[in-house]
């Protein structure tokens, strides 16, 4: 369990860190007293235990609400993180809940002081949504991924093997780069890597010294991977589900158990295909269904849909909110 402070907080001590900064800059943050319930001695074996990752946009008191474009940017960025996890997990996918928006009880300045955001947010989640990421129920658990306006470079996470956890990151390096300009972590790509890394901590992954591990330095996230037994650890968490079976709708190869998402010759949808005997071509895909290329769509336009979290056929193009979009698999 670990938490990473990226700088630019209330004290501004770490703003001047160079690009070569290492994971030595990370701090350990513990869950509240009494939440463990001897977790270390208990393995998740009960089939009744379920979990999901719940993304929450936090708007601190006095901070500006996200615009439609900004919220869509968050949706596309999370779609990129989802696809990264689909690529890295061989047999299961992370179980994602829809994005929630939460009005914070305190200002961003308060949250950034003395790690107050870490201590206060679980209770605020309980008050607004009726559940606590640390609450052990033996049934429906949740991992909260809190993305906070004006939290700048704050990033931290922790979790248990039974699907409970909390990750908190700032939004400025994704949405408002002028506010963090000059800091080594202030890029959209690094924001993606930070979210993937902190979620790894909620799945109980420790830091890693392997250079291309996402649990090491995580700037170029598309080139980072799970190493050693990390994927096995994540897949054992109840916040994952089996990959999609044959003939379920899909948007990328990594979603499918067979690693093949395509159209079955002239099919008008993208399905998980059983074997290479079914080529991955597709055409005449109607509006609202997933696609990869404009030529596959009846409308002639294949564009990212914030609602779907993937590319779909549409009558008009949507902006590409985040560059680059996690690449499709040909």
Image (cartoon, rainbow, N blue to C red):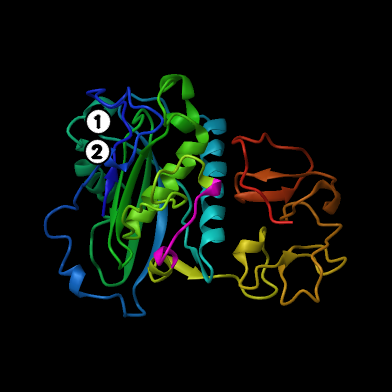
Residue 5 lies in quadrant: top left
Question: Residue 205 appears at what percent x and percent y?
Answer: 34, 58
Name the residue rendered at 40%, 63% in the picture: 230
Q: Residues within 10 Å of mark 1 (few under 14, many from 20)?
A: many
Mark carried by residue 265 = none
Q: Which residues are magenta?
A: 222-231
Name the residue rendered at 37%, 48% in the picture: 198
Residue 193 part of the magenta-drawn span: no
Q: Residues within 10 Å of mark 2 (few under 14, many from 20)?
A: many
Q: Quadrant of the C terminus?
A: bottom right
Q: Marks 2/1: CA distance?
A: 6 Å
Residue 262 lies in quadrant: bottom right
Residue 183 seen anywhere in this rendered image of the structure: yes
Query: Label 1: which residue?
Result: 112
Q: Are marks 2 and 1 in contact (CB under 8 Å)?
A: yes
Question: Residue 192 appears at what percent x and percent y?
Answer: 48, 42
Image height check: is 258 above or below 35?
A: below
Image height check: is 220 above or below 274?
A: above
* Numbered disc total: 2
Please state if 93 lies on the left or on the right of 209 as rendered. Answer: right
Q: Residue furthest left?
A: 33
Q: Quadrant of the N terminus?
A: bottom left
Query: Label 2: which residue?
Result: 117
Name the residue rendered at 55%, 36% in the picture: 73
Assign the magenta stretch its main secondary structure. Answer: loop
């Amino acid at each position: 369990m670990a938490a990473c402070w990226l700088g630019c907080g209330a004290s501004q001590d770490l703003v001047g860190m160079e690009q070569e900064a290492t994971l030595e800059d990370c701090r350990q943050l513990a869950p509240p007293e009494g939440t463990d319930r001897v977790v270390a001695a208990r393995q998740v074996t009960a089939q009744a235990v379920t979990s999901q990752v719940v993304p929450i946009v936090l708007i601190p008191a006095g901070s500006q609400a996200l615009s439609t474009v900004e919220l869509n940017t968050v949706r596309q960025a999370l779609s990129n993180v989802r696809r990264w996890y689909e690529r890295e997990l061989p047999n299961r996918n992370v179980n994602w809940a829809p994005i929630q928006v939460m009005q914070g009880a305190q200002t961003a300045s308060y949250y950034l002081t003395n790690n107050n955001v870490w201590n206060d947010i679980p209770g605020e989640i309980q008050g607004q949504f009726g559940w606590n990421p640390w609450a052990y129920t033996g049934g429906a658990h949740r991992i909260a991924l809190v993305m906070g306006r004006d939290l700048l470079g704050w990033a931290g996470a922790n979790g248990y093997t039974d699907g409970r956890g909390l990750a908190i990151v700032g939004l400025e390096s994704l949405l408002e780069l002028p506010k963090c300009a000059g800091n080594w972590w202030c890029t959209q790509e690094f924001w993606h890597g930070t979210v993937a890394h902190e979620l790894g901590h909620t799945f109980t992954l420790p830091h890693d010294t392997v250079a291309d591990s996402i649990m090491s330095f995580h700037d170029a996230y598309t080139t980072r991977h799970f190493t050693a037994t990390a994927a096995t650890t994540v897949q054992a968490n109840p916040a994952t589900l089996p990959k999609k079976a044959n003939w379920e709708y899909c948007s990328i190869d990594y979603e499918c158990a067979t690693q093949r998402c395509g159209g079955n010759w002239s099919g008008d949808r993208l399905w998980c295909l059983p074997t290479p005997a079914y080529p991955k071509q597709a055409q005449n895909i109607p509006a609202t269904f997933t696609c990869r290329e404009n030529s596959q769509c009846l409308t002639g336009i294949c564009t990212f849909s914030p609602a779907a979290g993937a590319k779909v056929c549409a009558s008009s193009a949507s902006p590409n909110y985040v560059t680059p979009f996690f690449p499709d698999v040909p």
